[in-house]
Image (cartoon, helix red, strand yellow):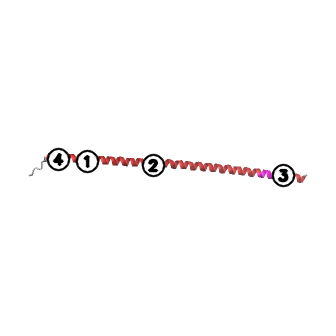
Amino acid sequence: MPDTGYNSTEVLEVLIGGCIGFVAVIGLIIFFILRYKVKIEQIKADAMVKAEEVRAKNQLEIERMLMQERHNSYYDNFKSNSLQDEICNDNEMIQNRHNERKRI
């Protein structure tokens, strides 16, 4: 057998060391990939929470505007009815005065 200058135990130690190093590098790569995926999921979750907050805020704003519109509509309707009542009352007063003058 030709002598290559390497002892079989040395070669075995180098191979084992290389495998251990390879496994360690693969483990680190897996660790960083998993950490990256967790960060992505965190960002997605934060974005969903933010979107839900915005959606809820917009819904509240819409409901507030609808309530304000209903209130204004009611007030305008009430004011319009009051104005119509006043006009009717004024017309009745004018008619009554006119009738009183006719009597005299």
Mark 2 touches mark 3? (CB < 8 Å): no
Residue bearing the label numbered 4 = 12
The residue located at (25%, 47%) in the rendering is 23
> Residue 17: x and y, percent?
21, 45
Q: Earlier in the sequence, mark 2 or mark 3?
A: 2
The residue located at (86%, 53%) in the rendering is 99
Q: Nearer the viewer, residue 78 or 4?
A: 4
Question: Crowding at label 3, few (<14), some or many (≥20) Cα neighbours within 10 Å?
Answer: few
Residue bearing the label numbered 3 = 96
Marks 1 and 3, how far apart at CA = 107 Å
Marks 4 and 1, how far apart at CA = 16 Å
Question: Crowding at label 2, few (<14), some or many (≥20) Cα neighbours within 10 Å?
Answer: few
SS category of the residue bearing label 2: helix
Q: Earlier in the sequence, mark 4 or mark 1?
A: 4
The residue located at (14%, 45%) in the rendering is 9
Mark 2 touches mark 4? (CB < 8 Å): no
Q: Mostly what secondary structure, the magenta segment?
A: helix
Q: Earlier in the sequence, mark 3 or mark 4?
A: 4
Residues shaded magenta: 87-99
Residue bearing the label numbered 1 = 23
Q: Amino acid at mark 1?
A: Val
> Residue 60: x and y, percent?
55, 48
SS category of the residue bearing label 1: helix
Residue bearing the label numbered 2 = 47
Q: Amino acid at mark 3?
A: Asn
Q: Earlier in the sequence, mark 2 or mark 4?
A: 4
Residue 9 falls left or right of residue 27 = left
> Residue 40: x and y, percent?
39, 49
Closer mark to the observer between disc 1 and disc 3: 1
Q: Nearer the viewer, residue 96 or 22?
A: 22
